[in-house]
Image (cartoon, rainbow, N blue to C red):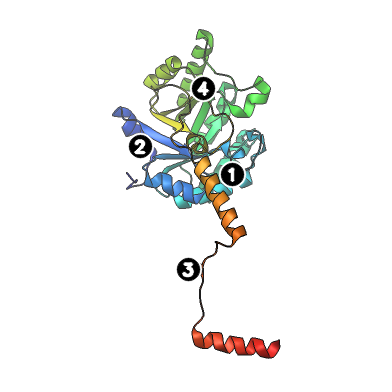
Amino acid sequence: MALEKKIKISDLQKLKAAGQKFAMLTAYDATMAAIQEAAGVEVILVGDSLAGPVLGLPDTIGVSMDISVALTVAVRRGAPLAYLVADMPFLSYYTAEMAIANAGRYMVEAGVDCVKVETNRKQLEIIRSMVQAGIPVMPHLGLTPQRAIQLGGYKVAGKTAADAIEVIQTAEMMVQAGSSALLLEAVPPEPAEIITRRSPVPVIGCGAGKFCDGYVVVTHDMLGLTPRKTPKFVRKYADLRTPMQQAFETYVRECKTGLYPAPEHDYPMGEEEKAVLAEWAKKKS
């Protein structure tokens, strides 16, 4: 069911309090965003996951603020009612000053409702500074793809009891710092459940089990558009890559064989105008 009103953080908090789940998906253009809003997706993320499907990059490191802001502006145009979250690109929040300035661009230029920051407890003061500046922040905890190279790959976070406790405590620190919501990626369901139960703010899971308040996956993955192997937690709801490729192949074939464009695709001239044109062409030949 299409969204009928602007989704605010208070709406997500009410859903959490009522034990009702909500959905979050990625979008990088106005058309996809509009379709998602029409389908009732409450939260839309312009993630740095755009690196692969949109920019053709091997990882998220190459996503710039300028590109991300431009795409976020487009998404907001397509989905004016959804709760819009934008990803802070790699090194865009290295200091509190940088974080506030770059997050401010999202808010002023794109009208986002929140910014997502891949973070840890070492950056707690940066998160606190952003909140104090009036910026709604969604810390991204657990697996943080921007640090995959530093960590030696994409690894599940919180598999041991000690690591799980660290994730839980970090989440609590982020909430105490004033975060509007949390996102947990690749975290076992046990610590995710504890975080969700204890947290007064909405908790969104990305491969973090069923106990979170909401769930997010990359749209291109769940639609079967990406050729790469998708993460374990992704369920493919469609295989759109195959019919799209078939449509392109049919178009190419019809262009080459003359089947397209057909007469019904033309904008014909009137008989009198054709006669005038023919007479002019005859004189010029």
Q: Residue furthest top?
A: 161
Q: Is 91 placed above or below 189 here? A: below
Q: Is 123 placed above or below 159 here? A: below
> What residue is pinned by disc 2?
10
> What residue is pinned by disc 1?
68
Q: CA distance from mark 1 to mark 3?
A: 41 Å
Label 2 is placed on what type of residue?
Ser
Q: Earlier in the sequence, mark 1 or mark 3?
A: 1
Question: Which dot, 3 or 2, sits closer to the camera?
Answer: 3
State the residue in front, 164 or 132: 164
> What residue is pinned by disc 3?
264
Q: Earlier in the sequence, mark 2 or mark 1?
A: 2
Label 1 is placed on what type of residue?
Ser
User: What percent of the width, then of the height, locates residue 44?
Assistant: 45, 40
Mark 3 lies on a secondary structure that is: helix
Q: Earlier in the sequence, mark 4 or mark 2?
A: 2
Question: Which dot, 1 or 4, sits closer to the camera?
Answer: 4
User: What percent of the width, then of the height, locates residue 180?
Assistant: 44, 33
Mark 4 lies on a secondary structure that is: loop
Which residue is depicted at the point 32% across and 44% down? 1
